[in-house]
Image (spheres, grey):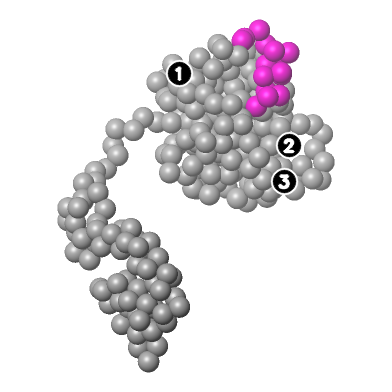
Amino acid sequence: MHVNLFVKACTCRGRRFIGSAITSKWPLSYALGSAFERNSKPFARTRSHATATGRNVSDRSPLDDNIHVSLETNRPKRIVVGITGATGAVYAIRILAILRQLGIETHLVISKWALATLKYETSISEAKLRGLATRSYTAKDLSAPVASGSFQHDGMMIVPCSMKTLAAVRSGYCDDLISRAADVTLKEDRRLLLAVRETPLSVVHLQNLLFLRQANAIIFPPVPAFYTRPESIEDMVNQSVGRMLDLMGIHTDGFERWDGFRRT
């Protein structure tokens, strides 16, 4: 008998029925029945009404044509740039300057030790560096757009990439925004370039590099090309930066490419 009462409670009048059933069959539970009936009213309203459209939930269909969706065709090209504390901040500065000149949207993440390296290796200020990017974030800001896969971009470059960040990305240990954004880039099957700066390399480093290459990351040690006969550090930086951008699908003419042996 009691089972039938609770089965009937699943009908449209179930809420009121349960309250009255508890009250009539179990007098000592009158207070409980009254409280159930009172407190269940908000839940009943939530179930019986639709969302913001005002339509009843039961009237909605998965084939509803009244959906306003359009293709995202006007999104600018976006590149995420992460800078860690490894030596070679000049590479990131040059990349940001070129992307800015090309009108490509950039989202910059700078670690605490990247700022320390920046001050030691260059004369550029933090404010000027951040000014080269469209938007910039601190490494602690895990609420930033680049921390989510729903934020669309065309790839990420970690330049330079320290061995600590390499290990974090390899293990999926996302303790800051750089490693989180890299993790998202991998899982969303987008281009991830790691300009690793370390020498010599230990077995641990090599295993991490191999693992990430097998995960489809691009491993790019910024090794200078002497066949171009560079005349300055800037020439060597430009050549490495140009090759990095090539791998991101951004082809520029700001550096010398190999065109066979020169005739002397």
Residue annotated with mark 1: 100
Above or below, 182 relative to 258? below
Tag 2 residue: 164
State the CA–CA distance, disc 2 to disc 3.
Answer: 10 Å
The kind of secondary structure element at disc 2 is helix
Give percent across and percent down for residue 257.
54, 24
The main secondary structure of the magenta stretch is helix
Q: Which mark is residue 196?
A: none
Is residue 122 in the magenta section?
yes
Q: Amino acid at mark 3?
A: Asn
Which element is circle 1 on? helix
Residue 90, x across and y down, in percent: 64, 17
Q: Secondary structure at mark 3?
A: helix
Q: Which residues are magenta?
A: 111-125
**In the rendered view, would you say 56 is above or below 260?**
below
Mark closest to the chain's N terminus, 2 or 1: 1
